[in-house]
Image: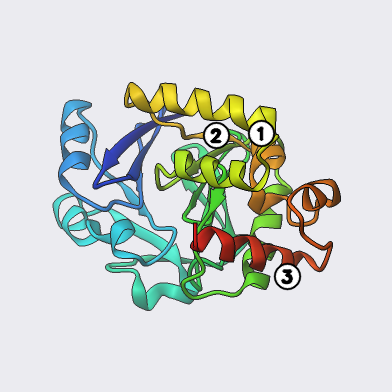
Amino acid sequence: MLKIKQLPVLNDNYIYLIVDKKTQITACVDPALAEPVIEYLNKENLSLNFILNTHHHFDHVGANLELKKKYGCKIVGNKKDSNRIPGIDIKLNENDFFAIGQSKCKVIDVSGHTKGHIAFYFKEEDLIFCGDTLFSLGCGRLFEGTPAQMVKSLLKIRSLPNNTKIYCAHEYTLNNANFALSLDPKNLKLKEKIVEIKKKRSKNIPTVPCYLGEEKNLNPFLMFDNKKYLMRIGLQNSTKEENFRIIRGMKDDF
């Protein structure tokens, strides 16, 4: 069993601490800053054994070296992107498995936001750390990848069970929801969701993790092949990749 601690940092980032309850082995996902991680570990009387990096952007690896120096932890990342992950020790490929204590995760290549972006899927815990690939009601910008790569990556995540918890790296949900509603203004479920999001954010409560099952029905970036949805938002039913490209372009200009 895992304990997950969510640490809000910077303007909208989330750092995650993963603690295997039985062994107390601890990992940190995408540490932008060291101080809040150290503060939490001190409070809980924990050390840091691993850092899991989803991709190379500074707001995901910024504290790698400082935390490694302090704790001697091992840094885990994508072998194909190892030259851009500071301090990397353990280089993994897609479909490799990695254990945090007694809990095992599978590496999934989810390139698109960046080349070499990966996610860590804990099947037995029904959760995935997906960095900047899939957000609640949104997805990451394509800084390095192509629409085809992102569609392939999103399909991998979409194929997971509906009860999978999505631990993404940013609090973008309200903006994403407003964009989704601009495409589908008569969607009552989206309107209800926005009310829920606003209530949470007014109390500074995170809107993530979210559940994949709900995302499949509300997230525009998971419905690029849903004929009824595409008709509602006025898109021709072209290829998945072209539909995604158009929706992503509209979001970039939103």
**Which residue: 58% across, 61% down?**
250
Residue identifier under label 3: 242
Instruction: Tell me, yes or no, whether the two marked residues, 2 and 1, touch with CB atoms within 8 Å.
Output: yes
Q: Is residue 6 left or right of residue 65?
A: right
Residue 28 x/y as whole percent? 34, 46
Comes first in the chain, label 2 or label 3:
2
Q: Which mark is residue 214?
A: 1
**Which residue: 27% across, 67% down?**
87
Residue identifier under label 2: 210
Residue toward you, 20 or 16 = 16
For residue 122, which quarter of the picture?
top right
Q: Identity of the amino acid at label 2?
A: Cys
Residue toward you, 218 or 24 = 218
Residue 169 x/y as whole percent? 41, 48
Q: Which mark is residue 222?
A: none
Residue 150 x/y as whole percent? 62, 65
Other-residue count near label 2 (Cα within 10 Å), few / some / many at <14 / 14–19 / ≥20 = many
